[in-house]
Amino acid sequence: MRPFRTSFRRRRGRHTAPEAGDGGDRSPAADHEAAVPDAEPTTTDTGDARPSGSRHGGIGDQTAESRGPLPSTGAPIGTGPSTAGPTTVSPLTADTSPPEPESATVDSVSVSDDVLALGSPDALIGADVDADARASAGERTAPLTLSSVAPPRTLPTDAPHVGDHLQPLPLPRLSTPTTSLPGLRADGGLLGDRWLGAASLAGQSHLNGGSTAQDAYQFTLSDDGSLLVAAVCDGLGSRPLTSQIGATLLSSLLCETARTVTAGQLSADPRAVLGGVLDAACARLAQLRTAGTPGLTDRDLSCTAVLVLLPATGTGWATRVGDCAVMRLAGAEWETVFPRDGGPVNRVSAALPHPAPAKLAEYAPLAEESPGDCLILASDGLAEDAFGSPAVRDWLAERWAQPCDAAAMADSLRYRRRGSHDDRTALVVWSRQLRNG
């Protein structure tokens, strides 16, 4: 696998999508854009964060010291899908160009307690997405300010500032359609003999505008217990009332379909197995859509997806369509499984559901885990922060040095960074050796 550079120019909150959900041969169109106040002077990502008091949760001011670049291999940036066979994933390496101006601070995590928690695929597909909901969504355009309402109570955290002088955030607004996802979801515990932690937070662009989060994750074990199965999906912002349905359904259907796979089948023909799971999950989604909400199209449910199958021993495999990421963290060293082209992460050339998803997908082997490793599935919102900021990488590496429960997973995503307005989702699987140690 080829190394890539971690500095790149960011597009604030922009997510591009393929036309009509037909794959990577279409010209991308603008998907969603954040509406977050970032008017203060530009600052530099410095990487050191020192906690101190803050009205938003006891967060410290950032020093002007720099950690300096990560070691670079100097190898060219890779493009395209991975080739078959076990390979060593490539380290994140720093660019020699000046860092992109940014700033990050922590703020309160807003939880949408009163929105509908989406349930099983068959129940969810009948969710109401009528014209009244569409009309009400269009009315929520102006963010609330802090002038007339006091900030909500929140919990203290050590999550860092990266830079300084960010303006106060507007008060969060809850989404009203019953198809909304919760603003915060978190899990932590044993899955088989591995510890799995996961968290998903609504992005600031959604909290400002009163729209729903669009990330979803799911996990399970294969029926024979030989595989850990995990998936992350990210709905496209161009379908704000329906793509989260697609993300939630598809993440569940991918895991449900993969339950029948065994470690032996994966080892014998990993691409065929993963492609078969993608095909079957998309076919099932089409059946549910047709039966439950025939007025919706595949494009209404558009999302990106990544799926990982991890055997108890030996080589695991990952497949993805779109811009979700798979990374490995070994100590403080970050590596990426799928190659990058050096541009923004949130640039989508393909999405699901699709009539032939296996042909769109990238496939990559996962090197056998070592003591202390953890494997990370991430939506583009978190991946772009990790790829672009040494300070964010240092923070997450420190938080994830040990297995996290649900509360710790949620807290690990509470940093704030200039231009980071998308949903953040991370599903982390720790090595058995680390948990047992």
Image (cartoon, grey):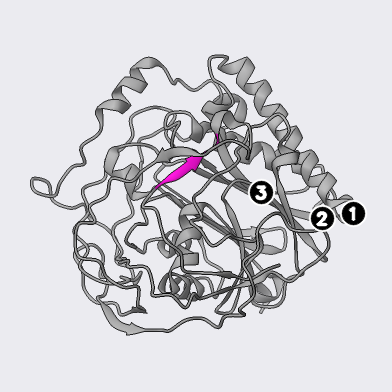
Q: Which quadrant: the C terminus?
A: bottom right
| Residue 293, percent from left and from top | 55, 17
Question: From which residue to which does the magenta span run?
Answer: 14-18
Residue 187 as seen in the image, left or right of residue 161: right
Q: Earlier in the sequence, mark 3 or mark 2?
A: 2
User: Residue 88's quadrant in the figure?
Assistant: bottom right
Residue 379, placed above or below residue 85: above
Q: Quadrant of residue 45?
A: bottom left
Q: Position of residue 68 (x, y in %)?
A: 43, 84
Residue plotted at (46% across, 64% down): 8
Q: Residue at x 66, y 71 (%)?
A: 90
- Which element carries disc 2, helix, strand or loop? loop
Q: Which residue is mark 2?
A: 226
Q: Secondary structure at mark 1?
A: helix
Amino acid type shown at disc 3: Arg
Depicted 291 relative to depicted 74: above or below: above
Q: Can residue 62 be seen from the camera position used here? A: yes
Quadrant of the image occupied by residue 429: bottom right
| In this picture, residue 46 sits left or right of residue 165 | right
Q: Decide: marks 2, 1 in contact (CB < 8 A)? A: yes
* Tag nearer the camera, 2 or 1: 1
Residue 264: mark: 1
Give how far apart the Cα atoms at labels 2 and 1 are: 9 Å
Label drawn at residue 164: none
Seen from the viewer's position, the closer of residues 389 and 58 is 389
Q: Tell me the kind of residue under disc 2.
A: Ser
| Left or right placement of residue 169 versus residue 340 in this view | left
User: Circle 3 sits on which residue?
Assistant: 320
